[in-house]
Amino acid sequence: RQLIILAGKDYGSGSSRDWAAKGPWMQGIKAVITESFERIHRSNLVGMGIMPLEYLPGQNAESLGLTGKESYTIEVPEDLKTGQTVDVKLNDGRLFKVKVR
């Protein structure tokens, strides 16, 4: 089972830049879905192979009713590009879209 992080605004802000991305990578995190990223931290996540994803404007974990107890499937196309929108499917049948940062 792969892990993701559901986060709020300015994810990675104020963290020790090196370990802020290395720690999640060592824990097996594959993606972070957040309202916004601290700029450098987003780049560090990419460097560690962690996919940075943002909720669409006006959305967040609370507005989508996400608790973190769900199982998530992120539909990743082979030609994935920054700025692209991808689908996230939940085990209960819900679906929402996120933007690749």
Image (tube, grey):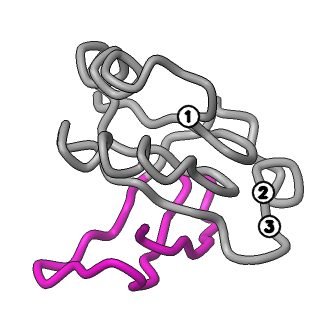
Q: Nearer the viewer, residue 94 or 29?
A: 29
Residue 75 vs 51, above or below: the answer is: below
Question: Mark 2: which secondary structure?
Answer: loop
SS of the residue under disc 1: loop
11, 65: nearer the viewer: 11
Q: Whole-Å distance between the Cαs marked 2 and 3?
A: 4 Å
Q: Nearer the viewer, mark 1 or mark 3?
A: 1
How far apart are the alpha carbons under marks 2 and 1?
Answer: 17 Å
The residue shown at (18%, 44%) is 47
Query: In which quarter of the view is residue 4 placed?
Result: top left
Give the magenta part as a residue range: 73-101
Q: Is residue 19 magenta?
A: no
The vertical placement of 93 against 87, above or below, is: above
Quadrant position of the C terminus in the picture: bottom left
Name which residue lies at 42% across and 83% down. Answer: 83
Task: Say the numbered circle drawn on residue 59.
Answer: 3
The mark found on residue 12 in the picture is: 1
Q: Amino acid at mark 1?
A: Gly
Instruction: Name the spot of residue 69 as percent of width and height, x first.
Output: 64, 30
Choose top left, top right, bottom left or bottom right for residue 76. Answer: bottom left
Left or right: residue 30 compared with residue 53: left
Which residue position holds label 2?
A: 60
95 vs 50, left or right, is right
| Pointer 2 local density, CA inside 10 Å: few below 14, some 14–19, many at least 20 | some
Tag 1: Cα neighbours inside 10 Å, few (<14), some, or many (≥20)? many
